[in-house]
Image (cartoon, grey):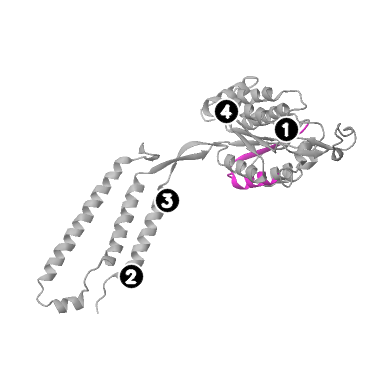
């Protein structure tokens, strides 16, 4: 298959037929000119003009459209392909969302958690239906809200109830990454093995699947959103990132919130102590972009920072066009055939109005 600047052809030699078409058009034009010379020799030009009106450029449009449609069809015969981002086979995205108390801060309207819910809804509406989406929520511990599924309603239902997962136990970033990695591995194991790969039984299964995943490019991506630093958990953030890196799962991180974000100590309930020395009930809850950036760099993902609901939605929109995809070629033959059909219909319609009529 040969190509140029992103366009390639499965059978490029068929493009030589365009030369034949160009020759036919040239012969037609020569024939038209010879007919015009013979017409001048007609003894009574007035009578000739009343029978065959003088040819004008609009009357050339229908035959030119026919020639153009034939050219498009000949290009289609060569089976053209274009480079584009294609959905990976068995593609899965694990959404990981921080539901700690700091997500109730209102520096991002209406709240950080509310903005995250709305952005994820938009993400679910935009990504391909064939993409499997799972949801993990975490605060002091991580929980699987929905396993990877194509059922968008199931994920959206869990998203609506996400506030029921809010606990006051801190932020366990490392444990949340471990949960997402385990969920991604389970999703891969439940799929059919890649063509030509025989999956062994027992302890060798996971190793063989992991080797194939790293070699061919992982079908699993993790989209991780948090608004704070780690305050609780067994694994440290970079330890969780190492698990994702070893599994060849890129982690795309989003740091949500502004450095000025605060929450009211009184809204946290009993047990959180009196106001600080200044007498303020407000607790600062700035995001931790440095840690999230390190996680993305370690795993081969990307880092984004969102300080507003609009920025968060744009981050999810951008990632939605990338996650679960890989560079590939897509055939566009059907588009050219359709375009040729439109050109032919246009030629017929114009020919009806522009073709010469006898009086």
The stretch drawn in magenta includes residue 104: no
Mark seen at residue 288: none
Which of the marked residues, 3 or 2, is nearer the chain's N terminus?
A: 3
**Where residue 145 sits in the image (x, y, percent)?**
73, 38
> Distance between the Cα atoms at labels 3 and 1?
48 Å
Q: Nearer the viewer, residue 105 or 123?
A: 105
Badges 3 and 4: C-beta atoms under 8 Å apart?
no
Badges 3 and 2: C-beta atoms under 8 Å apart?
no
**Where residue 289 sits in the image (x, y, percent)?**
66, 31
Residues in magenta? Answer: 117-139
Badges 4 and 1: C-beta atoms under 8 Å apart?
no
Residue found farthest to the top: 203
Residue found farthest to the front: 278
Mark seen at residue 335: 3
Residue at 36% x, 67% y is: 349
Mark seen at residue 300: 4
How crowded pointer 4 is (Cα within 10 Å; few <14, some 14-19, many 20+) is rated as some
Which of the marked residues, 2 or 1, is nearer the chain's N terminus?
A: 1
Which of the marked residues, 2 or 4, is nearer the chain's N terminus?
A: 4
Q: Nearer the viewer, mark 3 or mark 4?
A: 4
Task: Please give the residue where the numbered disc 1 appears in the rendered image.
Answer: 228
The stretch drawn in magenta includes residue 122: yes
Q: Is residue 286 visible?
A: yes
Task: Please give the residue where the numbered disc 2 appears in the rendered image.
Answer: 352
Badges 3 and 1: C-beta atoms under 8 Å apart?
no
Residue at 36% x, 39% y is: 10
Q: Nearer the viewer, mark 4 or mark 1?
A: 1
> Distance between the Cα atoms at labels 2 and 1?
70 Å
Q: Nearer the viewer, mark 2 or mark 1?
A: 1
Q: Nearer the viewer, mark 2 or mark 4?
A: 4
Figure quadrant of residue 347: bottom left
């Amino acid at each position: 298959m040969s190509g140029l600047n992103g366009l390639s052809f499965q059978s490029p030699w068929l493009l030589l037929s365009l030369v034949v078409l160009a020759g036919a058009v040239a012969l037609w034009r020569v024939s038209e000119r010879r007919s015009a010379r013979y017409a001048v020799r007609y003894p009574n030009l007035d009578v000739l003009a009343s029978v065959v009106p003088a040819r004008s450029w609009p009357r050339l449009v229908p035959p030119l459209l026919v020639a153009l449609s034939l050219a498009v069809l000949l290009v289609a015969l060569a089976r053209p392909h274009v480079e584009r981002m294609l959905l990976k086979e068995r593609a899965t995205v694990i959404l990981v969302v921080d539901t700690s108390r700091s997500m109730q801060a209102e520096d991002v309207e209406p709240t950080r958690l509310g903005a995250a819910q709305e952005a994820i809804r938009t993400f679910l509406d935009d990504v391909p239906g064939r993409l499997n989406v799972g949801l993990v929520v975490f605060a002091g511990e991580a929980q699987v809200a929905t396993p990877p599924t194509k059922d968008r309603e199931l994920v959206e239902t869990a998203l609506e109830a996400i506030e029921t997962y809010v606990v006051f136990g801190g932020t366990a970033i490392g444990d949340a990454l471990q949960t997402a990695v385990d969920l991604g591995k389970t999703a891969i194991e439940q799929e059919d093995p890649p063509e030509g790969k025989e999956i062994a039984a027992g302890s060798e299964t996971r190793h063989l699947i992991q080797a194939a995943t790293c070699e061919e490019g992982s079908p699993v991506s993790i989209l991780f959103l948090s608004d704070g630093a780690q305050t609780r958990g067994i694994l440290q953030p970079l330890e969780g990132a190492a698990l994702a890196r070893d599994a060849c799962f890129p982690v795309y991180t989003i740091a949500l919130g502004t450095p000025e974000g605060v929450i009211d100590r009184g809204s946290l309930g009993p047990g959180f102590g009196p106001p600080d020395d200044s007498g303020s009930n407000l607790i600062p809850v700035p995001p931790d972009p440095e840690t999230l950036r390190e996680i993305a760099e370690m795993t081969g993902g990307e880092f984004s920072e969102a300080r507003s609901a609009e920025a968060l939605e744009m981050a999810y929109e951008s990632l939605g066009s990338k996650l679960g995809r890989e560079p590939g070629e897509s055939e566009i033959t059907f588009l050219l055939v359709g375009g040729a059909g439109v050109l032919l219909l246009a030629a017929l319609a114009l020919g009806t109005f522009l073709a010469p009529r006898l009086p």
